[in-house]
Image (tube, rainbow, N blue to C red):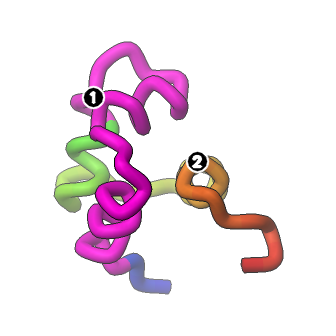
Amino acid sequence: MTLDLRRLKAERIARGLTQDEVAEAMGWKTRTPYAKRENGIVGIGADELVKLAYILGYTENE
């Protein structure tokens, strides 16, 4: 499965969220772990992807 990181960023911006806000919702103390994932430096794990989808407003069925 390939994740479109540009779409991830676009979804975040469309919902008016900053990297800091998403990182906090993920339980990280700084935005760095999220920024590295959004920029493709670090891969996004399946559990993280599910949590990100929830933060961005998607349900399990979407």
Q: Are marks 1 and 2 in contact (CB under 8 Å)?
A: no
Q: Position of residue 61 (x, y in %)?
A: 81, 77
Q: Secondary structure at mark 1?
A: loop
Image height of 46 relative to 7, above or below: above
Q: Quadrant of the C terminus?
A: bottom right
Residue in view at x 36 percent, y 49 percent: 16
The residue under label 1 is: 31
The residue under label 2 is: 55
Q: Position of residue 4 (x, y in %)?
A: 33, 79
Q: Position of residue 34 (x, y in %)?
A: 32, 40
Under mark 1, the amino acid is Arg
How many C-alpha atoms fall within 10 Å of the one at disc 2: few (<14), some, or many (≥20)? some
Residue in view at x 37 percent, y 56 percent: 12
Q: Nearer the viewer, mark 1 or mark 2?
A: 2
**Left or right relative to 11: residue 58:** right
Q: Earlier in the sequence, mark 1 or mark 2?
A: 1
